[in-house]
Image: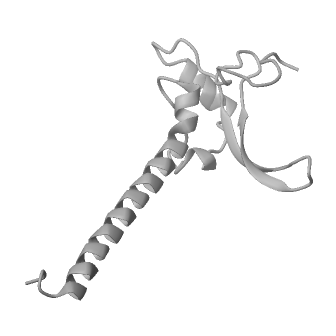
Amino acid sequence: MLMGDRAKYLTLVSSIAFVSLLFLQQGGIFCGLIERTARPIEVVNAPIWVCDPQMRSIDDAEPMMDTDLYRVRSVPGVQWAVPLIVRVVNAQLRNGQYQSVRLYGLDDATLYGRPAKMLQGTPSIC
């Protein structure tokens, strides 16, 4: 039936091609968002994360009180626990423009959570 009507056939084939393109594009966007969201967890590589029960996203995390940190450290089986703060801030570039960056606040005694490979500088405490 479609082979006899050339316009309907071309419309059907082009529609299927367009839907396939949209499907692949949206899948790529979804994978990119999931990868970006999971990046802080993969970089820090902590076996257990302890946070406020009201936390919705790692970008919305409020710092824990020192008493909560000591309470976590006192749990039997916990060898160590260090605070980590992640914030999205605006950084001014050398050309004067601003760009949003993810800033990690690490424990200054252990520097746990620092990047494994640094392009510039050293991971020592300044």
The residue that appears at 57% across and 19% down in the rendered structure is: 73
Regarding residue 84, the answer to whether it shows in the image is: yes
The residue that appears at 70% across and 15% down in the rendered structure is: 110
Question: In the rendered view, does 90 fall on the left or right side of 29?
Answer: right
Question: In the rendered view, does 46 fall on the left or right side of 117?
Answer: left
Vertical arrangement, residue 120 with respect to residue 95, above or below:
above
Question: Quarter of the image holding residue 5?
Answer: bottom left
Vertical arrangement, residue 115 with respect to residue 100, above or below:
above
Regarding residue 50, the answer to whether it shows in the image is: no
Q: Among all residues in the image, which is located at the extreme left?
A: 1
Q: Nearer the viewer, residue 97 or 111?
A: 97
Vertical arrangement, residue 83 with respect to residue 19, above or below:
above
Q: Nearer the viewer, residue 84 or 122?
A: 122
Question: Quarter of the image holding residue 1?
Answer: bottom left
Vertical arrangement, residue 108 with respect to residue 27, above or below:
above
Question: Quarter of the image holding residue 7?
Answer: bottom left
- Measuring from the top left, give residue 56's x and y in whole percent: 52, 51
Q: Nearer the viewer, residue 121 or 103?
A: 121
